[in-house]
Image: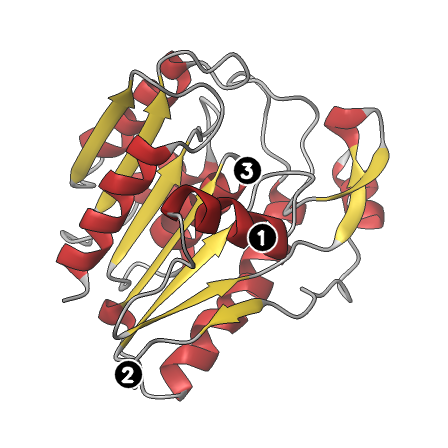
Amino acid sequence: MTEVDDEKVFPLRIHIPRANIVKSERPNTATLILFHGSGGNGEDFKQWLDILNRKELRFPHIKIIYPTAPIQTYTANGGLPSNIWFDRRNVSIDAPELKHSIDIMCNKASELIHREIAGGIPPSRIIIGGFSMGGCLALHLAYRFKRGLGGCIAISSFLSEKSLVYESLKFDSSTKYPELLMLHGIEDNVVPLQWGESTFNKLQTLGVKGRMLAINSASHDIDETNLKYFKSWVKDKLR
């Protein structure tokens, strides 16, 4: 697929449908934005986490936003239409990224962040995260587009070996980036643990601070152990 083909698949008019929002119990002083994986949607992602939490996932002072990706052609799935954040040729750490499609969606997702800032939430009180492709989107946002955010979470996610994120960080003079939490199932048979470890190690080398946890009980999913670490980390960062 050429760059021109990429532009045809991802027109500039693309938009993110309405998001599912969980209001905080008190007036919110922070925001958490969570991006689902390929083929999912914000409502299903919310329900998944609620089931694991055994009640609606909610924080006293943190608003949660679950956006839904637009339906677009997904080359890695035989060109079938799917809810995806960006296109890719295949699910492989060796596959080159399609810059045009990633950048369009990062700009659209940035609008969600801008709205929160306009509503009085400081960037440092905003955490973004996601599962699988959603985590990859969060990594691009946090380390290419929105480096003043309060943190980034990537669950069962990876970046390509020659990711635009790495190239961007190489030429950046900043000394502080959003802190990173990566969670990855040891038995993940879709995105191997080694891909997640490679991503985390490269980001660390380029100045990103954080931690990565390999979850014994998980495959390519989020389980109760993932959720426990995830909730604790968010509460600590957005007290």
Which residue lies at the image location 23% right of the left edge and 39% below the top edge? 229
Which residue is denoted by mark 3 in the rendering?
133
**Mark positioned earlier in the residue sequence (3 or 2):** 2
Does residue 12 appear to the left or right of 129 in the view shown?
A: right
Residue 149 occupies quadrant: bottom left
The 10 Å Cα crowd at callout 3, few under 14, some 14 to 19, many 20 or more, is many
User: How far apart in space, not on screen, are marks 1 and 3 (Cα)?
Assistant: 14 Å
**Badge 3 amino acid:** Met
Q: Picture coordinates of residue 132 (x, y %)? A: 51, 34
Which image quarter: residue 52? Answer: top left
View extreme (front): residue: 54
How far is the residue under mark 1 from the one under mark 2? Answer: 35 Å
**Residue, x 40% and y 87% (percent of image)?**
118
Residue of label 2: 26
Residue 192, position in %: x, y? 45, 14
Dot 2, crowdedness within 10 Å: few (<14), some or many (≥20)?
few
Residue type, label 2: Arg
